[in-house]
Each structure stands twice: as C-alpha cells, then as structure tokens.
Image (tube, rainbow, N blue to C red):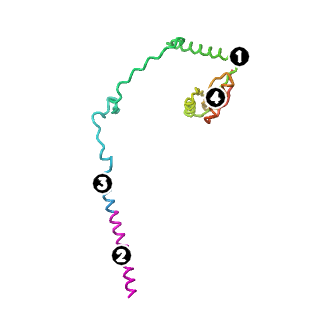
C-alpha cells in the first residue's frame, strides 16, 4: 500500500509541474499581447504643427519662443579712448600698426632681448585653437602662429613677449600647475 501512495504522490508532482508551466506560459502570452496592443507613451500624443510652426519665407521653421524673448535692449555705446586713433581706411590701419610696432620696440630697449613662451605646436589649427582657448580661461593671451615645416603646416601657440625672467617664471609656474608644458623662445 505504501508503494501505491508513493506512485500517486510522484504522479501528482509531475502533473503540478506541467500545470504550473502551462499557467506560467499562459500568463506570459497574455502579458505580451497586452503590452503590444497598449498605446506607447508620448508617441500618440504628438501634435501636428500649428500655424506658428509653419516654415517662414526663407524655408526655415520659426522660433516658437520668439514671443518670450521681448525686445533686445540697445547696448550702451562704447567709450572712446582719447589716445586711440580713429581708423577709417587701409592707410590708417597700416599707420596704426606701425605706431604699435614702434611703441613695442621702444618698450624693449636695453639689451634688446625679449622672450616668448611656446606652449605647444600642433599639426591642426583646431588643436592649436583648443590650447589657445584653454590659456584664455587661465587669463593668458596666446597667439597661434602658422608656419610651414617640411612641407606640412605647423601651428605654434605662443605667449608674450616678456621682458624679464620674473614674468616668464611666473607664467611658466602657472602653466605647469595646469599641466601645460612650455619652452622659452628668445627674440631680438
């Protein structure tokens, strides 16, 4: 009699396992059908463009936030420097450049030695401009000088000119603190 009970229990376990699989699969199929037929959020809520969003005469869409901007205030006029010359023609530009070159030459009297700091040399102008922008964030004014080297362009990023070694050491220290290597270039 005990073998009869054991075989019945074994049979009911197998039936329960199969029944559980069938019920589980039925629930999975019902969930899949429900989810595929359910509306997808945000897709059914898209509205057609209204009158405000029609292309303008130039073919571009108008700015929907234009009404929020208001009128732009007129910027205040820039004060003119008394010693700054008025530049109106190409000859005036050339004369102003010559005066600036003379003033720089007079400022570097002494032994005539001036120093530049070269912060980098790059094969692409974009890389050089990136370093120049990084230096500008540090408050330093850099110049990108393109040259031809071995038939390929090279873009040098330079700071200066500086007249004293104290200035150079101060700037080099600031560059080193910001992980920028630099080299001293001597000019006359």
Q: Of the residues under marks 4 and 1, which one precedes in the sequence? A: 1
Q: Which residue in the structure is indicated by mark 3?
A: 38
Q: CA distance from mark 4 to mark 2?
A: 84 Å
Category of crowding for the residue at label 3, using alpha-carbon neighbours closer than 10 angstroms: few (below 14), some (14–19), many (at least 20): few
x%, y% of residue 95?
57, 12
Magenta segment range? 1-28
Q: Main structural element of the magenta stretch: helix, strand or loop?
A: helix
Total numbered labels? 4
Q: Of the residues under marks 3 and 4, which one precedes in the sequence? A: 3
Q: Viewer-nearest of labels 3 and 4?
A: 4
Q: Residue furthest bottom?
A: 1
* Residue at the spot 32% in from the left edge and 47% down from the top edge: 43
Q: Which residue in the structure is indicated by mark 2?
A: 15
Q: Secondary structure at mark 1?
A: loop
Q: Which residue in the structure is indicated by mark 1?
A: 110
Q: CA distance from mark 3 to mark 4?
A: 65 Å
Category of crowding for the residue at label 1, using alpha-carbon neighbours closer than 10 angstroms: few (below 14), some (14–19), many (at least 20): few
Relative height, residue 81 to residue 124 (above, below): above
């Amino acid at each position: 009699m005990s073998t009869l009970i054991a075989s019945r229990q074994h049979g009911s376990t197998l039936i329960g396992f199969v029944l559980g699989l069938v019920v589980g699969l039925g629930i999975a199929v019902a969930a899949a059908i429900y989810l595929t037929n359910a509306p997808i959020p945000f897709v059914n809520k898209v509205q057609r463009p209204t009158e405000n969003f029609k292309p303008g005469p130039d073919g571009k869409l108008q700015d929907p936030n234009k009404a929020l901007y208001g009128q732009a205030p007129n910027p205040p006029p820039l004060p003119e420097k008394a010693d700054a010359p008025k530049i109106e023609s190409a000859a005036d530009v050339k004369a102003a450049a010559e005066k600036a070159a003379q003033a720089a030459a007079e400022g570097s009297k002494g032994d005539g030695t001036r120093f530049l700091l070269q912060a980098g040399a790059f094969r692409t102008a974009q890389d050089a401009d990136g370093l120049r922008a990084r230096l500008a964030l540090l408050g330093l004014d850099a110049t990108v000088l393109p040259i031809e080297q071995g038939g390929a362009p090279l873009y040098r990023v330079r700071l200066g000119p500086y007249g004293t070694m104290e200035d150079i050491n101060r700037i080099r220290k600031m560059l080193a603190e910001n992980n920028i290597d630099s080299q001293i270039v001597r000019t006359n």
